[in-house]
Amino acid sequence: MKKYFFIFTALICVLFQSCDTSVNQTNALDFENKINVGTVETPSIIGKWYYNSEDDRYYYQFISNGTVYYQYYQNIGAETSALNTFITKTGNWSYLNIEKNSFSISWDDSIACWYDIISEDNEKLVVKRREDGPVGLGLGDVTNLLKSAKTVVYTVDEEIKGLIGTWYYDETKNGKSIKFQVDGICYCKYYQNYGSGTFSNLNGWVTRKGVWHYSKENKLLSITMDSEISYYYDISDLSSTTVTLKLSNDSPAGTSIVYSANPLYK
């Protein structure tokens, strides 16, 4: 009888050990699955996305606080128009679901537009406009948001490289100035005196933005400031310290705020 008792006890011990091992293996497998699920990367719209692979100045940028920026080139009028420049539009965005695979985007001048995030790889994030949502401007025709784009390198003709930089209208290098940038943008800083009295809040230093362009064919420098027409100049006596911008015969009547009959100083 004792023999059968010992055999029965041994069988029970083996059974409990087997069950315990099975439970431990199951728990370990569940834990491993939870870790794997937690480390799976899901697409996210947050970040800076390009929509022109050849130019990194064209982009959308989604900020985690719900703000979105859209930078594009505004092309209005002639090549030398000061209206031709990069514009940044501001809007708002938010996820539409807990899974964060759908989002809404709206601009200050447009109602919202809904999108689904379709896929993501090393090069792009693919989105698709939802037909069941409002019909705002959204991302326009853009469905591929690129993770990178070529950086634009500006070049300036060798003969006028010295023009780049800040030039002052007097030798003290204080006061009025004009700054030429390699990207074709220029800024003129000057004192504005519009008020009817000494203490008018319209009086003070202001900076106006413009665009410049140099023609190698006719050797003319065109400068177009905001709210002005284009004026053309002959570049004379360009050195590392001085330059004279002579108003060309091709210029329209009148003068620009940047004009000076005297040399400019760097």
Image (tube, rainbow, N blue to C red):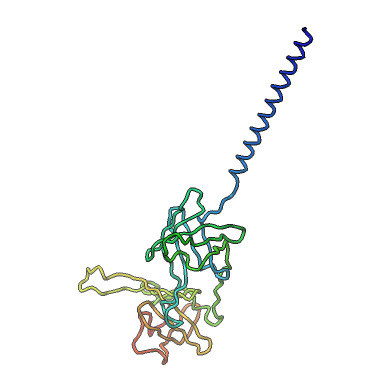
Quadrant containing the N terminus is: top right
Looking at the image, which residue is at 34% across and 87% down? Answer: 254
Residue 251, image x, y percentages:
40, 89
In the image, 159: left or right of 70? right
Q: Is residue 75 left or right of residue 39?
A: left
Query: Which one is in front, 183 or 120?
Result: 120
Closer to the camera, 256 or 65?
65
Placement of the C terminus among the 4 image quadrants:
bottom left
Residue that protrudes farthest toward the top in the picture: 1
Question: Residue 145: where, in percent of width, then height?
Answer: 54, 63
Residue at the image position 59 percent from the left and 50 percent from the top: 41
Q: Give the image location of residue 111, x and y in percent.
A: 39, 63
Relative height, residue 159 to residue 64 (above, below): below
Residue 150, quarter of picture: bottom right
| On screen, residue 100 above or below 213 | above
Residue at the extreme left: 197
Q: Residue at x 32, y 73 (%)?
A: 191
